[in-house]
Amino acid sequence: MKILVWFQYIGTEFSGFQIQNSERTVSGEIEKSLIKIFGSPVKVYGSARTDAGAHAICHPIAFEVPEHFQIQK
């Protein structure tokens, strides 16, 4: 199952949206949170990238819910 959510954030403390080595990024923090929720890594896909310090009011991101977490019909 794919999930689409819209995030709002103040980017002052971030080095942009996309993951970078040794830098704190928006998608990196979201992925850390999703690991805590689902118990396994989840890749986040943003609709766009932002520069360091940029803020967002309505930034869409998508991710796939891990199979072991999905509800069976």
Image (cartoon, rainbow, N blue to C red):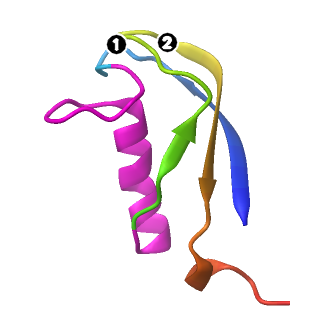
| Residue with the most extreme right position | 73
Q: Amino acid at mark 2?
A: His
Classify residue 47 as left or right of residue 51: right
Kindly check if marks 1 and 2 are in contact, taking CB atoms under 8 A apart as contact.
yes
* Total residue callouts: 2
Residue 39 falls within the magenta-colored stretch: yes
What numbered label is drawn on residue 55? 2
Query: For mark 1, does the 10 Å Cα neighbourhood hold few (<14), some (14 to 19), or many (20 or more) residues?
Result: few
Looking at the rendering, the stretch of residues picked out in magenta corresponds to: 16-40
Above or below residue 21? Residue 51 is above
Q: Identify the secondary structure beneath mark 2.
A: loop
Q: Amino acid at mark 1?
A: Thr
Q: Residue 54 at what x, y percent from top left? A: 43, 9
Q: Residue 19 at what x, y percent from top left? A: 32, 35
Q: Residue 45 at what x, y percent from top left? A: 55, 41
Can you identify the residue that label 1 sits on? 12
Classify residue 12 as left or right of residue 22: right
Residue 24 falls within the magenta-colored stretch: yes
